Amino acid sequence: MFEYAEALNPAGFLPILKWFDYKGLVKRAMSIGKKMDSFLQGLIDEHRNVAATVEESRNMISHLLVLQQSQPDYYTDEIIKSLVILVRATDTSAVTLEWTMSNSLNHPDVFKKARAEIQSVLDLDQLMDELDLSKLHYLQNIILETIRLYPTDPLMVPHLSSDDCMVEGYHITRDRMLIVNA
């Protein structure tokens, strides 16, 4: 799944290739999607069977299955599968937040300056909203610097070399795909 999620699909750049399913990427992605759906459905079914024998469950799927009993029209198996995938996708945000907090604690002067900015710009009687971040320039810089220092995905977007060149003693030919490890 991860191999095809990061694959460069030329059809994204040349729309005519979508008609031909260039290199079978779409067909393979659909196959992986069906396998993933089957795997997640198996997890849900397994938790559903275990929940019938165990009174107290302590994981997300089990809690969602309890909610499914009270609101079956909303908490369908498809919604539960989507939520499981969504939670996995939040990992990068959580890692960035963890590094940001860790760096803030290790640099109290930076933390004090960010706190002063927040107190001067925002109404402290309300929760901070995503729109408020555009007013907090120093905090934005802290987050961007954290992402630069501790990227959650170290591999950058693939690039093509424009000319023959030498990098660290390696001969790189023109139009060679390069993937940079940040």
Image (cartoon, helix red, strand yellow):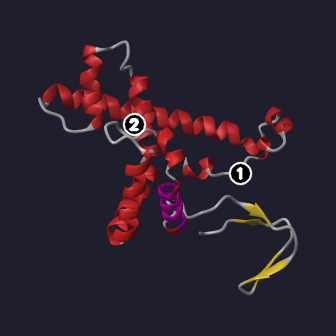
Quarter where residue 24 is shown = top right
Graded by Cα atoms within 10 Å as few (under 14), some (14 to 19) or many (20 or more), the crowding at tag 2 reads some
* Residue at far left of view: 55
Q: What amino acid is at disc 2?
A: Val
Q: Nearer the viewer, residue 74 or 147?
A: 147
Task: Give the distance between the C-alpha atoms of the residues marked 2 and 1, in whole angstroms.
Answer: 26 Å
Q: Nearer the viewer, residue 25 or 180?
A: 180
Tell me the quarter of the image containing the C terminus.
bottom right
* Residue at far top of view: 73
* Residue at far front of view: 120
First to last magenta residue range: 138-148
Task: Tell me if 36 is positioned left or right of 74 in this view.
Answer: right
Circle 2: element type: helix
Residue 141 is a magenta residue: yes
Q: Position of residue 29 (x, y in %)?
A: 62, 39
Seen in the picture, residue 90 relative to 101 is either above or below; the reply is above
Magenta span: chief secondary structure: helix
| Residue position marked by numbered label 2 in the rendering | 84
Q: Position of residue 149 (x, y in %)?
A: 51, 69
Residue 116 is a magenta residue: no
The numbered mark at residue 8 is: 1
> Which residue corresponds to the image point at 43% horizontal and 55% vertical from the top-left?
117
Seen in the picture, residue 179 relative to 2 is either above or below; the reply is below
> Which residue corresponds to the image point at 36% horizontal and 60% vertical from the top-left?
101
The numbered mark at residue 33 is: none
Task: Tell me if 121 is positioned left or right of 28 in this view.
Answer: left
> Which residue corresponds to the image point at 88% horizontal and 72% vertical from the top-left?
163
Q: What amino acid is at disc 1?
A: Leu
Reading the chain from its start, which is encountered first: label 2 or label 1?
1
